[in-house]
Image (cartoon, coloured by chain):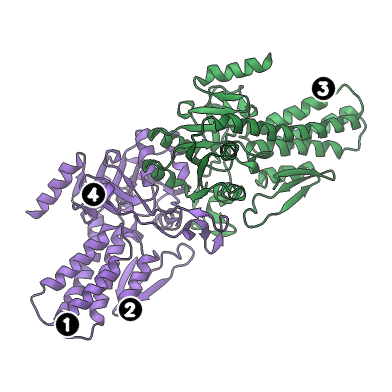
Chain colours: A purple, B green
Amino acid sequence: MKTMDWQDGCLVLLDQTRLPGEIIYIRCEKPEEVAEAIKTMRVRGAPAIGAAAAYGMALGALQQKTGDREQFMKRLQDIYDLLAATRPTAVNLFWALNRMMKVAEDADTGDVSEIKELLLTEAHNILLEDIEMNRRIGKYGNSLIPYRARILTHCNAGALATGGYGTALGVIRAAHEAGKQVEVWADETRPLLQGARLTAWELMQDNIPVTLITDSMAGYLMKNGQIDLAVVGADRITGNGDVANKIGTYTVAVMCREHGIPFYVAAPVSTIDMNLASGDEILIEERESSEVTNLYGREIAPSGVRVFNPAFDVTPNYLVTAIITDRGIIRPPYEENLGKLFLDSDK
Amino acid sequence: MKTMDWQDGCLVLLDQTRLPGEIIYIRCEKPEEVAEAIKTMRVRGAPAIGAAAAYGMALGALQQKTGDREQFMKRLQDIYDLLAATRPTAVNLFWALNRMMKVAEDADTGDVSEIKELLLTEAHNILLEDIEMNRRIGKYGNSLIPYRARILTHCNAGALATGGYGTALGVIRAAHEAGKQVEVWADETRPLLQGARLTAWELMQDNIPVTLITDSMAGYLMKNGQIDLAVVGADRITGNGDVANKIGTYTVAVMCREHGIPFYVAAPVSTIDMNLASGDEILIEERESSEVTNLYGREIAPSGVRVFNPAFDVTPNYLVTAIITDRGIIRPPYEENLGKLFLDSDK
């Protein structure tokens, strides 16, 4: 099972809105199709969005007929803007788009067809590097997992949310591969049920024991001593270690602290946005009310009811036990230790 | 809109599994039909279950052909057992059944037809008293509500959960009737969506402003200062003030304390079970996994996934700001003050 693949000049995406009932791949030939797939969450998860957007840029480049570099760059900027407008919260989206743009800008050739090649190669690199980063996240994260562990996760930070292997689920996969006795509690994650539809499905494919619960049951399990740790992904981490992630993550983190349970965040360094000092500066995407009131076209609430539907929340740094990155485990104080991480990488 | 009504020798119940899409009343002519309606949650909510079960006893009595009191009582005990086995957590069920049984046992007549009359009258009394109790709960509770209040509620402790008017929603109704500016945040309350299907619907009928959220969004709202207080119902309250209520209530209570938000429980005194010293002794009903994996017959999770589905959780007394009863507001220390309440009532 692949989240995305490049085939015959097209980006092929597993349509995650159809899982687990149907396994359907869609072919994107144009950047507009990639943008639509991101917006409607056919592809979702911060790292996967980044990689898909990179391919969207590559498609937009390959499509162009012009041989004029200036015209080419102007159109590329339009495609950048189109893709950047799809989802506001995940920073990997902007990280990937900027990386693509930089390749085009820095190319020391006037030959547009060469730039196109460079862009496609860069998109491939972003995808392959992501899988590699996730394996490193898994390796570091595994060091935090006891031999027997009952692990809570929220939403889907798995192979489906990334190029492959997963961030939070990458940590769980690595522990499972190391022979540890891990069992997963998967929050179903309303409104879009990524936990039920994607996380449970993905773990069942790998024969990792998983039990599905509704989001409000995790507290009950914690109180009864049935959860040893929680690990989630992230859509954006700010310079002070605040974490934007799927709505409900903040509640999981508070409940973990209430019960003395470690709360880990697993994410590649590309998720860290050092331009933002704290989570207060993160724009939280609000999505359509129909995500809450309808399920597969069926109304599950009174017609016309008012709805509030924020897609993310922010977990403040003091609730985060550690951040598991592809460059190691970061512990508090985050401002200092995340700062060091970026200083080191500039060397 | 009535939750239940006695018509032409039948108990007529609003089928709450069909709301809000369809308003359908079912007629129960036999106690077995009442038991089925309770089990499948066509009628639900602790006080409503109590009243429906009382009518179930009355139906079982009226149905009998025998004129022999001993035979009659034996059969009545069978009906008691049938109804008592429907839902284990709500104490009002047992309270109502015991009250009915006592009427039959204490009747100073050997005439079975007279006992039948007494039983039907008692069932009517239980229903009418419940509405009256809820109005008193509302009156007391209103004293706790500020002039402008944004109120979170979980599940449905409304007119639909009771004989009428509601417990938690009774408090909100009373504040609204008193001219206060109340706005309600309704947790949708997975898995059975009583908040979306019943609470939102009920409040919209009464033109009380309501906004629907998924269960995991309440924490986000609290963090943003958008919730002033929470009020919920109860299925059972133990002698020390621990509260069994719909799964997720415990998480709401912890989040309230984290944010310094008052957390109130509204319930009639019949919900208080002085026979249990603490919430540890409450039997928590586990329900079928299909409630989590299916919605209106559609699968929303992978086939065969393992599920854990507890219907209730227990909120420990230290998280409860006050218990609003039909005999006044009870504050900590609960063991002492609930004890006093029952001592007073024995005088």
Q: Type of residue at label 4?
A: Thr
Marks 2/4 same chain: yes
Q: Upstream in the sequence, badge 4 or badge 1?
A: 1
**Numbered badge on residue A113:** 1
User: Does residue A189 appear in this view?
Assistant: yes
> Where is residue B251 drawn, in percent x and y?
45, 38
Marks 4/3 same chain: no
* Secondary structure at numbered mark 2: loop
Residue occupied by mark 3: B106
| Residue at position x 29%, y 42% in the image | A316
Q: In which quarter of the image is residue A235?
A: bottom left
**Numbered badge on residue A29:** 2
Are the two marked residues, 2 and 4, in contact with CB atoms closer than 8 angstroms?
no
Observer-nearest of B266 and A19:
B266
> Vertical placement of B322 versus A333: above or below?
above
User: Does residue A151 appear in this view?
Assistant: no
Observer-nearest of B229 and B245:
B229
| Real-space Cα separation, disc 4 to disc 1, in angstroms | 38 Å
Residue occupied by mark 4: A238
> Where is residue A167 drawn, in percent x and y?
29, 53
